[in-house]
Amino acid sequence: MSRGVLVTGASSGIGRAVATAFAALGDRVAVHYGANRTAAGKTLAELSGSGHVLVTGDLADPAAAQRLADEAEEALGGVDVLVNNAAVATGPENAHTVAGVSYADWQAVWQRMVGVNVFGTANLTYCVTRHMIDRGAPGRVVNIGSRGAYRGEPEHPAYGASKAALHAFGQSLAVSLAPHGIAVATVAPGFTATDRVADRLDGAQGEQLREQSPFGRVGKPEEVAAAVVYFASAEATWASGAVLDLNGASHLR
């Protein structure tokens, strides 16, 4: 049976791979984007099947999160699966070591990362799952966390902290939403090859990243998508509350 699936941050990278994987199963996908409508349109155009829609909204804005949930609910005839993938990510432009930035810049980065990665995810999840509860329908929430929640992000502490919060958030909701038939799980990828980080895979830095795994490579978006699809399946109900490390043994805990 076709499901309605909302994937945030689906304009490229892991989000695009996740949207593609659900569409291949025959599900109807709401492709969310924050600013890059052109890239999101490309994702939409490449999805197999029908019934897919394009949705937008700044997750840092609580009102926008509510509108996004309502729009996706209406457009898909009900959201059965929410994939919380959108995030302000790591990168040179977001680096914020204590010794390297001003106090004002430090605050700005923390507010931006936590505003999207934690508050935005929490608000959207509330709105989407309330629709599930109101419909009396079972559902799935899958969060995209990070190994950075465990191994540390020395140049991006707000990112590591936000992903750790996301892991804990998912486990809390797994307990509280289970009576409503809603399962919640988290995938925690290691470094994953996407267009956004392609430049970091060149030269010596790329070699260092690949050497972190005994497999001698970094992850693929499709590998993350496969894990998300599993967590969203009926067979994965008993995995609710799980945080799956998906990093090619590059970080063990």
Image (spheres, rainbow, N blue to C red):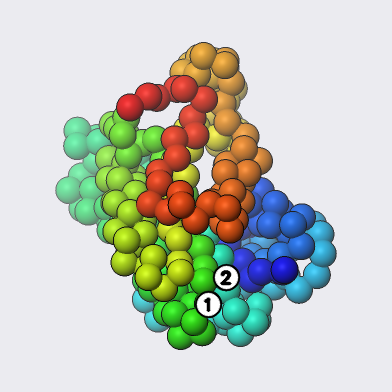
Q: Considering only vertical position in the picture, is 176 above or below 24?
A: below
* Res 124 quadrant in image: bottom left
- Disc 2: which residue: 80
Task: Tell which circle, 2 or 1, labels the residue nearer the N-terminal end.
Answer: 2
**Residue type pointed to by label 1:** Ala
* Residue 184 in sight here: yes
The front one of 135 and 235 is 235
Q: Are marks 2 and 1 in contact (CB under 8 Å)?
A: yes
Q: Residue at x 22, y 53 (%)?
A: 107
Q: Secondary structure at mark 2?
A: loop
- Disc 1: which residue: 137
Q: Nearer the viewer, mark 2 or mark 1?
A: 1
Q: Considering only vertical position in the picture, is 146 above or below 139?
A: above
Percent of width and height locating residue 54:
66, 71
**Residue type pointed to by label 2:** Asp
Q: Residue at x 57, y 44 (%)?
A: 227
The front one of 163 and 100 is 163
Percent of width and height locating residue 84:
48, 58
- Left/right of residue 97 with respect to residue 40 in the rendered view: left
Mark 1 neighbour density, 10 Å: few (under 14) some (14–19) many (20 or more): some
- Left/right of residue 205 with respect to residue 164 in the rendered view: right
Distance in Å between CA atoms under marks 2 and 1: 8 Å
- Left/right of residue 34 with respect to residue 27 in the rendered view: left
